[in-house]
Amino acid sequence: MIAILGALDGEIETITRALREYTTHRFGTYEFRTGTIDRVEVVVGKSGVGKARAAMVTQYLIDHFPLTKLVFTGLAGSINPDIRIGDTLVATDCLQHDIDASPLGFARGEIPYEGVRVFAADPELVERASQVLPASGRVHRGRILTGDQFIDRNGLQSMNYLRTDLAGDAVEMEGASVASVCSFNGIPFCLVRTISDEANQDAKVDFERFLPVASANSMHFIRALIGAD
Ligand code: ADE
């Protein structure tokens, strides 16, 4: 069974609508649906926003369903001038930009005392997602940075390290948390994000405008990623 997650209902709406013969499962205030898309068994739901909720939901799904892989989809803010609004970013890897134990001698992004920093997405899923022809825009591969902040210009100006030290291409609020839990449990994962904004002064407006666009765009990628399994 393949898990398909997005942070918000709006980010997975098109995918939820494509589900056939589904059953609903409750977890607290969250709802997950198991069913089929293109005859492939999937569980679809939202992770909630931020690293804590995303980790909680990912572990719940791993514990309750026989997952073979997990695909996370939704929006991200580009911090790479070559990656524009409407493009799609397939993460080759990701890390948490806001974990920082540098006073203890650890690199920014590193989980202290575990030697773990960057989470690599499953190479085969990355390859498959990179071949998808999106409805519009270009498809890029790159590095996603995850943290518990929605970043606009004010944040970005004081966070040069996102590009310089961490070599990030886009920012969002769940991916590396999901990746951390998947990697801990040995579940292959893939993150596909539609670029909604450029983490600048327009980020809020662009983000809200892009929710339905992202949901439709994600469907192209989901079909490619769950097929031919
Ligand atoms: N998701 C989409 N845009 C974002 C931004 N600018 N910061 C954090 N998460 C985002």
Image: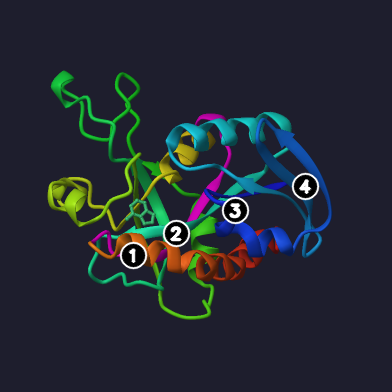
Instruction: Give the SS element for disc 1.
Output: strand
| Quadrant (top left/top right/bottom left/bottom right) for the C terminus | bottom right
Q: Is residue 1 left or right of residue 170?
A: right
Q: Residue at x 37, y 46 (%)?
A: 94
Q: Residue at x 51, y 72 (%)?
A: 131
- Answer with the quadrant where ligand 1 appears in the image: bottom left
User: Which region shows up in magenta?
Assistant: 184-200
Which residue reaches farthest right? 21
Q: Residue at x 43, y 36 (%)?
A: 51
- The disc, 4 or 3, on the residue closer to the chain's N-terminal end is 3
- Look at the numbered disc 2 and say if its residue's Cβ is closer than 8 Å to ligand 1: yes
Instruction: Mark 1: give few (<14), some (14-19) or many (20+) Cα within 10 Å.
Output: many
Nearer to the camera, 33 or 152: 152
- Look at the numbered disc 4 and say if its residue's Cβ is closer than 8 Å to ligand 1: no
Nearer to the camera, 58 or 14: 14
Q: Is residue 163 left or right of residue 212?
A: left
Instruction: Give the SS element for disc 3.
Output: helix
Q: Are marks 1 and 2 in contact (CB under 8 Å)?
A: yes
Residue identified by numbered label 4: 34
Instruction: Give the distance between the C-alpha atoms of the residues marked 4 and 3, in whole angstroms.
Output: 15 Å
Residue 49 image position (x, y, % from top left): 47, 43
Tell me the number on the disc at residue 75. 2
Instruction: Mark 4: give few (<14), some (14-19) or many (20+) Cα within 10 Å.
Output: many
Q: Amino acid at mark 1?
A: Asp
Q: Are marks 4 and 1 in contact (CB under 8 Å)?
A: no
Instruction: Give the distance between the C-alpha atoms of the residues marked 4 and 2, in whole angstroms.
Output: 23 Å
- The disc, 2 or 3, on the residue closer to the chain's N-terminal end is 3
Nearer to the camera, 45 or 116: 45
Tell me the number on the disc at residue 197. 1
User: Which numbered disc, 2 or 3, marks the residue closer to the eye?
Assistant: 3
Q: Residue at x 54, y 70 (%)?
A: 217
Residue identified by numbered label 3: 9
